[in-house]
Amino acid sequence: MDPTFRSRRGLSRRELLRQLVSTAACVPVLANGRSLADQTPVQKPAPDTAIQLSPLPPATYLSPGDDTFLEQLENAIFQFFWEQCNPKTGIVKDRCNVRGSDTSILGSIAATGFGLTALCIGEKRGYVSYSQARDRALATLRFLWKKMPQERGFYYHWANIATGERLWQSEVSSVDTSILLCGILMCRQYFEHSEISQLAHEIFNRVDWNWLSEDTRVLPHGWTPEGGFLQYRWDSYSEMMMMYLLGLGSSSHVLPPQAWDAWKRTVFEFDGIRYIGSYAPLFIHQYSQAWFDFRGKRDKYVDYFQNSILATDVHRRFCLSLSKKFPDYSENLWGITASDSEHGYEVWGGPPATGPIDGTVVPCASAGSLPFLPGPVMRVLRTIQYRYGAGTWSRYGFVDAFNPLTNWYDSDIVGIDAGISMVMAENARTAFVWDTFMKNPEAQRGMERAGFKSYKPASPQELVEMHNHASR
């Protein structure tokens, strides 16, 4: 393996994004040629200012054929989380080479959070028995509580799957711990098992959110024993919404409600569509909504579910705007987010264009937005499978990325990318993860303390329009 590729993988997505923003690798130009200076002004709305978004695109729903396809996809991804996990510790590999032998010991606590959620989905769908899924969840929580190295309840980003030992001098990660906590709370609600319930309670309440927020309402990305808190803060809209909501929902180390107001909600505009975003890939609109159900709810600022619909539609339009340069991008094939590439791991996306976009397609970019734009996303996923076939498909579902223009196909499955695809496929089909996770009192308290209230959206997101399979 190329050592450059390995070292870049050792960095978090956020670290890579910061590096790209500070170098020429981040190209701050919109598809229509406008510079960032010409874009909607970057500003933090006043605390009581509701943000006006653009009208929603038409809704669609999943057909029986779509459901059959997603069943195949979920089953394949589940096998990754079942087989590429140490059964004694429950830690899931960061990634797996599906084209050859894989001996990696690198685990990811974020992938482990998705893996715990996958256990619930897998048992519900009959991929494993109840006792198998329950016992794997129980083993994982026992290890996390008793043996896994942690600091004030927060876990190291990368760990040895067999021992839990910190790897690559990784940081104690606030957001990756949050993803893990979401998986833990999901298991508590689903299995309704006394020891799982108790362990989940202990693990969650050990997390000291006040340690992170001791001198700030804007939480840091993490901490290392060598250097203390990282200088970077979760100060803008991104995948961190789950972290603030979990902290607000704590009963032992609760964040102050003002923390929800402390981060910026920057309004972007592309192709006449206004939405809240960041200079970051599409995954920032997906991760928190894998577990937290924002449908029909809003805080004093915005409806975040509606916002993710718009952001996904904007990303689709952005990819189409690049089709003259990259002719593989079309209504049938679009979607780029942080992923592998032919030359290493890249944090790319847009608008504005971020990273060295080269025509690569990332299946989880669209799959992670299945609940937001089910019709357009299904067109992409089925195109990938049926047009590009064996190059993109493996025993664990889609490989992480591929480039039709250069005939490059990845050899790896990346845990968090497979995870967001599986969880959002299930939410699009049945809302199972949302419905189960939101029974947790921590989730309910978090959204209540953040000021969320139920309402009837101006454009309800009922799935009302049959998708035209003949057009695929």
Image (spheres, helix red, strand yellow):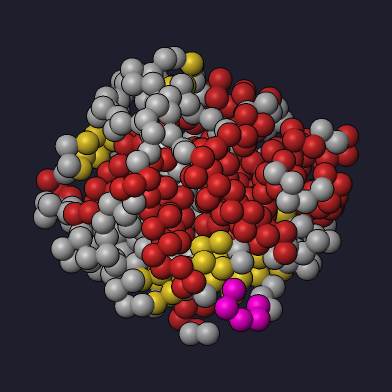
Residue 61 position within the rendered picture, expressed as x and y whole percent measured from the top left = 43, 34
Asked if the stretch drawn in magenta spans residue 213, the answer is no
Residue at image location 58% in from the left, 41% down from the top: 426
State the predominant SS element of the stretch in magenta.
loop
Q: Is residue 95 left or right of residue 314?
A: right
- Residue range (magenta): 98-102
- In this rendering, is residue 102 above or below 28? below
Residue at image location 27% in from the left, 65% down from the top: 328
Which residue occupies the foreground of this view, 223 or 122?
Answer: 122
Which residue occupies the foreground of this view, 442 or 332?
Answer: 332
Residue lying at the far front in this picture: please name it.
Answer: 470
Residue 238 position within the rendered picture, expressed as x and y whole percent measured from the top left = 42, 43
Can residue 247 be seen in this snapshot?
A: no
Residue at image location 74% in from the left, 46% down from the top: 126
Quadrant hosting residue 278 = top left
Which residue occupies the foreground of this view, 131 or 72?
Answer: 72
